[in-house]
Amino acid sequence: MAGNLTRDEARERARILDVTSYDVELDLTGGDQTFASTTVIRFDSSEPGARTFVDLVAPRVRSVELNGRALDPAEVVADGRIALPELAASNELRVVADAAYMRTGEGLHRFVDPVDGNAYLYTQFETADAHRMYACFDQPDLKATFELTVLAPADFEVVSNTAPDAVREPVADADRPKARWHFPPTKPLSTYVTALIAGPYHAVRDEHDGIPLGVYCRASLAEHLDADAILEVTKQGFDFYHGLFDLRYPFEKYDQLFVPEFNAGAMENAGAVTFLEDYVFRSRVTDARYERRAETILHEMAHMWFGDLVTMRWWDDLWLNESFATFASVYCQAEATRWQDAWTTFANVEKAWALRQDQLPSTHPIAADIPDMQAVEVNFDGITYAKGASVLKQLVAYVGVDAFFAGVRAYFAEHAWGNTELGDLLRQLEAASGRDLSTWSREWLETAGVNTMRPEFTVGEDGAFTSFAVLQEAAPEHPTLRSHRLAIGLYDRTSDGIVRRERVELDVAGERTEVPQLVGHAQPDLVLVNDDDLTFTKIRLDERSLRTVIESIGDIRGSLPRALGFSAAWDMTRDAEMAARDYVSLVISGIGGVTDVSVAQMLLRQAVSALYNYADPKSRDAGFARLADRLRDLLTAAEPGSDLQLVYAQGFADAAVSGEHLSLLQGLLDGAITVEGLAIDTDLRWTLLRRLVARGQAGEAEIAAELESDPTAAGERSAAGCRAAIPTVEAKALTWDRLRSAEKMANAEFRATLLGFSEPAHAELLRPYRDRYFALVGEAWRNWTGEFAQTFAELAYPGSLIEEETLRATDAYIEQERPAPALRRLLIEGRAGVERALRARAKDAAAG
């Protein structure tokens, strides 16, 4: 993790430099390890004679020329930087290098399709990896125009931020036809949103409202690309954002490229967005997957305005990009697409992520303190994305939707093509709303931790409330009590299910807020604090409401209140206020009444997690057997071919432990057992096989046979995960040796292998690797790329060994080795998970 740019260094460069333009030439027609990269940078300095540096990571720097004077690479190049002495007022820097193709998902990534042998390239530069492709001042507030010329094989499609003005210009070559592409200069951009994608990509082109559109994927996936559905969401997004922002899309074209081995969900390169290739569905998926893809499409589109047009000055304000894009995408989904229950999904997915993150010892304010690049790389988390978006939703309720977006529009107008800080946005929101947001900012953006809301009431002999109040709590380590705008809903059992009878919206502040509006109302079966999910908080249920949720949650009409009931129960389980066995019973009893597919998937994942992590190990198999029995019954009774049928099949595979259940999985896999409407397609076959392998019912022969039937990149990843999940001492040892040689694997294979190796059912097999993890993690952090080091630190952490020894080993390593702050954060997060699980297991054991 070399070249760790600090905030102070970036500020100093920004103080003395004004970067005008980049002119980059690349030759992609050489070997498969490196490519030729020539960069010309024009920039001014406010302090002639000063020194600075430019960023570049490359195996070989051939020449460096500053203002016509050659600099010796041996003297000026070190640790990912090129020293630049004696700047002039106006400067021209020319750097010629052999840069390296990457297999880690950073820089210019190169992938070879096992199906047809074609090579595919794409860039991933966030947070600071543009300097793996070309020399640059790689920080967000030194924006400049970017002009690109690419020499590529003649059969390549080449895509960048602008449309090419010289397309496939032929270049004579005796060995292989080549073509030169030229892309005219962009508007001023931050380096991390510049982009290059090249290869024999399949392309579908269209146009909407004067904007040229493109959708791309690998040729071998073309038959699976549902470009019409992707373009439908794209067009809905443009129409909605144009009206909402009152500002047209700021770039000349919009390409969306689904690329292999991507290390994130998507990346908002200006005019050339890259997506995780898994969003091209080669097997049947539920509508929840289409909903998530649509959210991602709309998230990246929102970045074109909030992130690319107007960009944070430094990574402290990363949340300004990500929280806004998350909020805007869900808002657009709910208002402009067929996913009108998008806020329910938000409550179940994003908000659950944020609540988990905000209760870790590493939690941080939304407006975070980011001293260097290593710190920001671990800050793409639930606080930055999901808590920030929840807080923005609260802010919209506080200032009003019209005032909020009026402020946003003024912010875009004032800062187009520039860089901003938090205060720039708050000033515009204050001007539009007439509200002072300084207190709100201090409470919500500059402090960490989550509050808990509890109802407190008394009831008279007639069954009506004689008093009602909301109690607000805060964790001792983060004692801030905030101002909340929330609603309280009263729900009754009726012949039509459990429905809302009354709703009161109010401001809550301090430890206790009286709610006189509810005095005199009959006590309902369910009191839901934070109805409609207006604020970011944990909620607790009174005894009667909890009983209603446990017994009848499936009867609650409305997907959002039902989701909030489940969320409250899950919070109580994680906080050891509710036994894991009771939570699993709640899921078993309520899952049949859940019609929202994304909610059903989340509940089943949480039930499995509760059994592995929070349940008394003595009762775990019995819990899995109960869950699997229920899912087997639901699977056979479900509407044939429905999304819920597929959810039940996938959930059953995750829960299968007993010989009876594993035999059913085997029968489904080999065709001896069929369920009407359930297609055992490629991806579901791998899911079934993975469970059989992890439980010792299948092995290398079955994995090899499945891979022979699916010799694709996805098949290779699935096979790697399965091999790592073989429950033998020998298989774990072989996998560990492969993990230690991470540089020989691509990022996607590395991640799949780690997930298989860390199978939670294999805790005893993993016991010897606790000490080996701590022996290797420091070396990995120092020597591997940021992406690989972080993935290893997180996924290989011995979190399945839920015992005091894991806590002691973590503490000893931190005390003795004094790891870098970013690594220390990942270690204490893993430790916190084990500590939480120990408390929850004690609660569950006591309940037994």
Image (cartoon, rainbow, N blue to C red):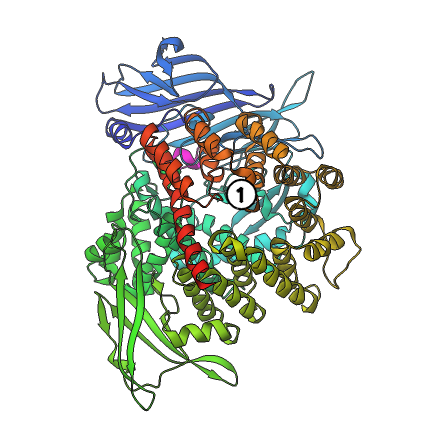
User: Is 667 covered by the magenta stretch?
Assistant: no
Q: Please state the extent of the stretch shown in magenta in the rendering.
A: 185-193
Residue 747 in sight in this render: yes
Q: Quadrant of the N terminus?
A: top left
Percent position (x, y) of residue 107?
Answer: 48, 30
Residue 262 in sight in this render: no
Q: Furthest residue to the right?
A: 672
Taking the image as shown, residue 702 lies to the left or right of residue 410, namely right
Seen from the viewer's position, the closer of residues 41 and 359 is 359
Percent position (x, y) of residue 306?
Answer: 38, 48
Q: Amino acid at mark 1?
A: Ala
Residue tagged 1 = 763
Seen from the viewer's position, the closer of residues 745 and 204 is 745
User: Is 191 covered by the magenta stretch?
Assistant: yes
Q: Residue at x 31, y 62 (%)?
A: 452
Q: In terms of image quadrants, where is residue 87?
A: top left
Percent position (x, y) of residue 169?
Answer: 60, 26
Q: Residue at x 51, y 34 (%)?
A: 768
Seen from the viewer's position, the closer of residues 456 and 532 is 456
